[in-house]
Image (cartoon, rainbow, N blue to C red):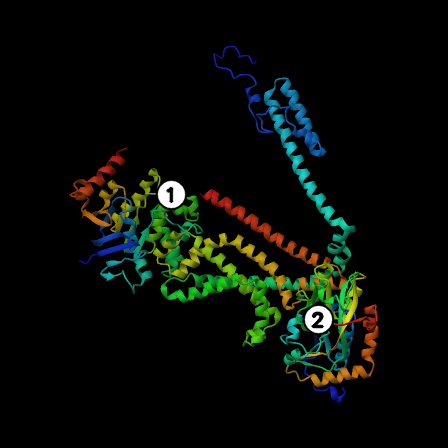
Amino acid sequence: MTALLALDGVGKRFGSAEVLRSISLDLREHQVMSLIGPSGCGKSTLLRCINALESIDTGVIRIGGERVSGPGVDLNRLRREVGIVFQSYNLFPHMTVLENVTLAPRRVLGMPRAEADATAEQLLRRIGLWEKAREYPERLSGGQQQRVAIARALAMGPRLLLLDEITSALDPELIGEVLGIVRELAAEGMTMVLATHEMTFARDVSDIVCFLADGTICESGPPDAVLTSPQQERTQAFLRRILQAQRI
Amino acid sequence: MAPALQGFRPATAGVLTVATNLPGPGFWDGNSPSTMTGGFEYGMAQYMAKALHLRLKVINVGWDGLVAGEVKGFDLALSTINITPGRQKVALFSTPYFASNQGVLVRTGTKVTSANARSLRWGVEQSSTSYEYLAGTLKPLQQPRVYQDQPSMFAALAAHQIDAVLLDTVEVLAEAKQAGGALRVVGQYRTGGVYGALLPKGSTNLKIVNTLIKQMKSNGTLTHLDKEYLVPEFGQDPDAIPYLQP
Amino acid sequence: MTVTKAGRGDRPQRAPGLAAQAPAAPGSPASLPGKQPWPYLALLIPPTGIPAMRKHLAARRAARSGENFTARALAAEAATWSWYSATLAFTLLLIAFAVLFLTANNHAVIEKFFNPGVLRSSAPEVLRGFLVNVELFLIAEVLVLPWALFVACLRMLPGPAARPIRGLAIGYVDLFRGLPAVVAIYLIAFGFPIAGLPVLGSMTGFELCVLALVLIYGAYVSEVFRAGLQSVHWSQAAAARSLGLSYVQTLRHVIAPQAIRRMIPPLLNDFIGLQKDTALVSFVGLLDAFNQSRIVASNEFNLSAVTGVGIAFVLITIPTARLVDRLTARDARRQGIRA
């Protein structure tokens, strides 16, 4: 069957620097892909290219078989199908948690307020933050804010969810609650691409792991293959360094 | 209403709108259009409004816009406006109703003679006949200072920024009186200037205005207004002021 | 020599009087009480000098009886009182100069600028003229807001196709920020009627002045709006767009509400400028307070009416200025807490 997400020879430059080179990958529906790699390898850029926050210079991106990169694409429609959660949560500080989650469904999908509120309630209950619905984001902890950010992205009913190092800005003890949600989503069959440093988590939840270095996919495959017995030298070196750091 | 006065078309129905540029002591006694107590030209305006069975409304307008024909929305302007060929190109003028030479106003104690006049620091009002006379005939050695309006000019004189002001004799006499001895009119230049009422170009009321002015001359109204408002305002007989040669 | 308390063990003692011998800043607690000259100078201003002296003498007494702690505390208080004397003296000096200025030359300044009689008699006329200024700035302030918002949005339109529009907006802002306000008012109030423009040429002087003020201050305020909108971190826009919100929706629901709070102090500052610049309409003949006061000044040969106008303008801008101070302080506090 056709891949839900297909990248074909995607490249991007920032000025003279080539940030992404010849990226090609396929992701089928209900699959979870983890992107790992050293900082600055282009993981975040790649995710932002998928939902068109950045444009690509070469190659094609397709979602559900439809081309979504290049000119003439209805970006707003694309973004309804692809949700993204950022490292710095980016909740809207002037709105309550509930308003944050219901804004896009009401304004973009035209959902009536009651329906939007009901959907939001469902999502917030699922992540255990319904009692904070009327609070402002600044009163919540980092982990709570990130969970609300996930709920906000889910409220639009996306087919594909992108998660850009969503635990990197959190205190260690808060990481668990956020990863718990992602685990549940994976179990429910949400198609996701996540950029992460959490190797154990990546192994548990992904179907495919891609190692990115210098803007290109160095190695990719099932988690056991890439994480436990990597073929490439670069991958091995990287994993060694990570494991050393995490051992402490 | 007499047949000669019929057919007056006011800018606003039922109202005679008379424009002037305040202050105009002697001609308009008062600080604002609504606090007029008397004055030569105010008296003329009142007479005309009564004769035409219209309510009188006085408005204050900027000077150089007025004499450049740029102001709209009034029937006639009475503001000690000298009739000049240049101004006649942009506006209509009535028959003259007053004559005035150019007077020299100085701080008390300044000596002005025909000989030393050119070496003084002069001040004049923008767009005035005084300015034209100074620039064209008197030709002082130092560039004269040109002011937006009369109050600024008189203030500059009092502040020692200029030595002498050239303006219509009747106007400087009135100002000297206001100054209570600090300023004096010490000379005048014979220019034979005459005042006329200014009407917007294209106005159809000129004939009626002329009729009214001729009436005021012949029935003694102007003489009466002169005696009542200008003579006391002057403090000196205008004809007694020494004439200077440019 | 201070004696070690028995039972405390052998700890090296500081040499006696080291603190006293070290060079100390005047008034600092470390300086030896009793050696400062300030309290004597402070006596020049008795209300604060006498307490300074008293504290100083008490400090000396305490130092003599070995209560160094108390002595230092008292010396610090003496120093504070001495400072009060100094600042009071400075203020009194300024006031003395002001009084001298006002009464010099047989009260010339008061007579010519602050004459109560003229102020009182001219007040009704000048205040009536002031109504013109008030009307002008109230109407202009209301109209400037939507116009400036419009220009700011034009300036921020994205995409290459919008370049000419952005250029126009930039041109407008540059023009009216560069043109002196008085020149702009003059050109618009006189120029439009002369040119005989269709609708604009037949507006009244007042309306043209409002138009001029809106155009001038629209330029400044549109820059305040643009800076405010752009000061909202782009990640907010990224989050909103990635949820599917359009450019306009993002602006309306996410960016603008956050920007507005930051825009208010510079906006109020521009409004203060607008309030003051309404005085410029006197140059095109409008009978506002300034024009009226000049007429009175000429008729009365006294500038007090003009001073009165100055006072009126200052009085109305003070509440706005205090409001700006309060809002800025509150914002700074909030940022501090957030960070």
Residue appearing at x 55%, y 12% in the figure: C3
Measured along the vertical axis of the image, is residue C80 above or below residue C3?
below
Is residue A117 in view? no
Which image quadrant for residue B202?
Answer: bottom right
Q: Quadrant of the C terminus of chain B?
A: bottom right
> A142 or B18: which is nearer to us?
B18
Residue C254 location in percent, x, y?
42, 55
Residue appearing at x 62%, y 26% in the figure: C75
Residue C223 location in percent, x, y?
48, 58
Q: Amino acid at mark 1?
A: Gly
Q: Residue furthest bottom?
A: B3
Is residue C2 in view? yes
Disc 2/disc 1 C-alpha distance (Å): 85 Å
Measured along the vertical axis of the image, is residue C80 above or below residue B153?
above
Residue appearing at x 30%, y 60% in the figure: A78
Q: Residues within 10 Å of mark 1 (few under 14, many from 20)?
A: many
Q: Secondary structure at mark 1?
A: helix
Report the disc number at residue A142. 1
